[in-house]
Image (spheres, rainbow, N blue to C red):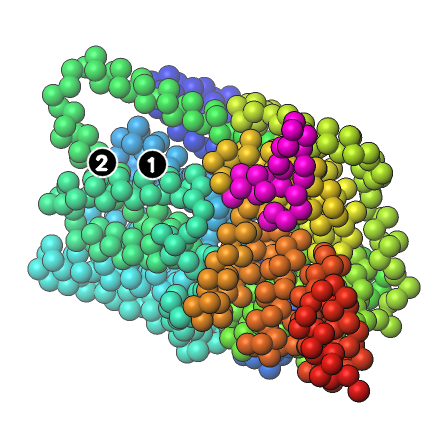
Amino acid sequence: MNATLQRGWVKMSKNPWLALLAGVGILTVVFSLRLLSDPDLGFHLNAGRWIIQHLAFPKTDIATYSVPDHPYIDLHWLFQVFIFTVYFLVGYQGLSILVCLLVCGLFYLLSRRMLDSGISYPILILLLLLSLLIMEPRFILRPELFTYLFLTLYLIILDACYARKRCAHCCFLPLIMLIWCNMEGLFMLGYAIIGAYLISMWIRDRKPDLRLLGWGVLSIVICFVNPYGFNGFLFPFELLTRFQANNIFHEHIKEFQPFFHLPDWTTKEYVFLSYFLISAFSIFITLRQRKPHELILWVVYGILALLAIRNIPLFVVVTLPITGIAVSEIVRRYGRNLTANVKKRTNLIFAYGILFIILGIIPRLITNEYYANNLSYNKTGIGLDRFQHPEGAVEFIESNQLDGRFINSLSYGGWLSWRLSCPIFIDARLEVIGESLYHEVEESWKGGLAGLIHKYQPDLVVYDYVRYFSWTPQLTALPGWHPVFLDGQSAIFAREGYAMEIHFPDTVKTFSQPDAFSGLSLDKKKTLLEQERISGLTQWIQGFYTRHSCTPPRDQNMASFFLQTGHIQLAEQYFLKTLQESCGTAVSCYYALAGIYLTTGNPQLASVCYRQILKFDPGNTTVTQSLSALVQERGGILFYATNCAANAEATKHFNRGNDRYTSGDISGAMTEYTEAIRLNPSYSKAYLNRGYIEATELKNFESAISDFDRAIILDSTFADAYLGRGSCRFTLQDINGAMDDWKKAASLGNPQAKELIVKHQR
């Protein structure tokens, strides 16, 4: 061992670039050692367990009660059995280490392929670093990790076949394909690669390579060796419909979105665009030297990458050596005239730059600040990320022996099927779920949850209330449904009569109610709101040594939940707690608190919130106008108005909703009002307008009543909301309820309500 290490040090001393390459290797390890957070992990483990327990392959859905008769072609069965076996032997920690080993193996193969292509170490190191930054979001335990490996192995074998004009190792192509087609549906990518090399060799040699053609045909035929035969072979081609623009899954799932349609760009998007442009430019400059298969692969995978962001790693894996060769040729072409000293200084600057980047990223990965800045839910570590999986909800269900039927949010389905013995409602296997059920869930986001509950008759609703925020006010307004569990990500509502020994007020006390923030005086609240936030530079420096905590987001999530359910005081306490823990940097809390203080008649604190927002965003004209409307100075005394918008960003969407409704775009108006509510759950006018559309245009009176209820909870003097709710109740034959609402609206000065009372009073 000592002799091996000594030889390694000798090599590094002779070639200092090896030390930088080792640094990239260490960065790869740190990047890939992550807590398991992918929502698909649960259903993969569940399927692997089922296959081993039954010694069979599923033909219909094995997880849900909603679509148990739907056909299930499980092309991931070998991957699922493999990871379940690893979990059975070494647990979640072993699965985290498995991801690290797979990623390191992939980057070793990529390095090997580029070195075999004659790419110099500086260019190799730069491209590996760029590829790490681009691909790291997909370092998750999914079958596609094996696709990256098999794709690279195919390219290595075919590169050797093309260079040596013989197919010495092509016999491995069908063997790799046999494993590939039983692990992941993207095995058809192997056909495209073989086809590209066949065309390229035909152009070069003026005749087809019959031996490679034979191995290619065998690679296709062997894909019929799967548990589903011909149907399994064709299934991946059916999945291509997901990428069609009119496909419902394409519209709602982020990883299917085109690259240039992404609303928010972070580091990885800018790095990918830089790599894409460098690659395109270098290939264009060296176009005459490029081989036909290189151009074919670059164009095909480039189009795929731009059409759907989940294909970006495939583009990088395939084009990395092509780009490296092209860049190397450009460097050699234009570097001939440089003196030795210039080359030496350039290499030195380049090496120190790469070293600076590596040393800058690693500590920020360890503290998780890198992921936080890039809006990623990933975290460095080994084992399970409990915050990203509904573990708290599962433990609550198990400890209280709640074995009734439940409706769950889509992302929770896989984990619930893995951890609970009862069937689930839905999970993320969209090809199994089908468009009909997905449409039903989509309607529930827009106010149709009551219909979903009526159809499936659940005892519980278990959901991610951060993403499914629209379910919370609907459940709150539904008669006979009560919240029984809440943590930083998950909520459970129970039907009246089921498990009613569990009471929500008691549940509130179990997750550390922030007593230190209850009963604060006006001055103490003002002091807390006016705290000086730490500077951006200080935050950046702290990111190198202070581990990023998920506590502020958890508290903020619960604050939003309480706001939606009408627990205004609890919401205020958790928003204040979030501000304290974030050192005043959680700007969204100021928006929410401004709405709370306006609703509860405290414009002085609302003005403080608006001033804090302007420190973050001085050019926010909407907030400036709101503050001007809120605060007026007369004779040196501040007078506070009470009619300004609760949230600047939400106001923009609210106004867009008004414009869309005026122009006849009902669906667009609903979307804008819903977004306004998401940004500011206390926006009573948005609830009113959305309820009005639901009642008058969509004839969805139950959902409309739910929105009117929320508007009334937020503003008990909102006459229009009482008017709207009364009209809905009248339509539903609740005459007494309608009269009560109209009388309340009339007492608040609404003339239309008085007319309705006179017209319909018995």
Res. 399 image quadrant: bottom right
> Magenta span covers which residues?
622-646
Left or right: 578 in relation to 13 = right
Mark 2 neighbour class, 10 Å CA radius: few under 14, some 14 to 19, many 20 or more:
many
Q: Which mark is residue 327?
A: 2
Q: Which residue is mark 1?
A: 127
The relative height of residue 370 versus residue 412 in the rendered view (above or below) is: above
Q: Residue furthest left?
A: 206
Where residue 272 appears, x then y in whole percent?
Answer: 36, 43
Res. 47 image quadrant: bottom right
Inspect the magenta stretch and tell me whether residue 638 lies in it.
yes
Q: Which three-letter amino acid code belongs to the residue tagged 2? A: Val
Where residue 459 appears, x then y in whole percent?
Answer: 78, 72
Sequence-wise, which precedes: disc 2 or disc 1?
1
Q: Residue at x 73, y 84 (%)?
A: 760
Inspect the magenta stretch and tell me whether residue 23 lies in it.
no
Q: Which three-letter amino acid code belongs to the residue tagged 1? A: Leu
Left or right: 265 in relation to 426 = left
Where residue 305 appears, x then y in whole percent?
Answer: 34, 54
Q: Residue furthest front?
A: 635
Provide the secondary structure element on which disc 2 rests.
Answer: helix
Res. 122 image quadrant: top left
Question: How much space separates mark 2 and mark 1, taking CA atoms?
Answer: 10 Å
Q: Residue at x 60, y 56 (%)?
A: 677
Where residue 660 appears, x then y in whole percent?
Answer: 46, 64
Mark 1 neighbour class, 10 Å CA radius: few under 14, some 14 to 19, many 20 or more:
many
Q: Which mark is residue 477?
A: none
Residue 250 shows up from this direction: yes
Residues at marks 2 and 1 touching, judged by CB atoms closer than 8 Å? yes
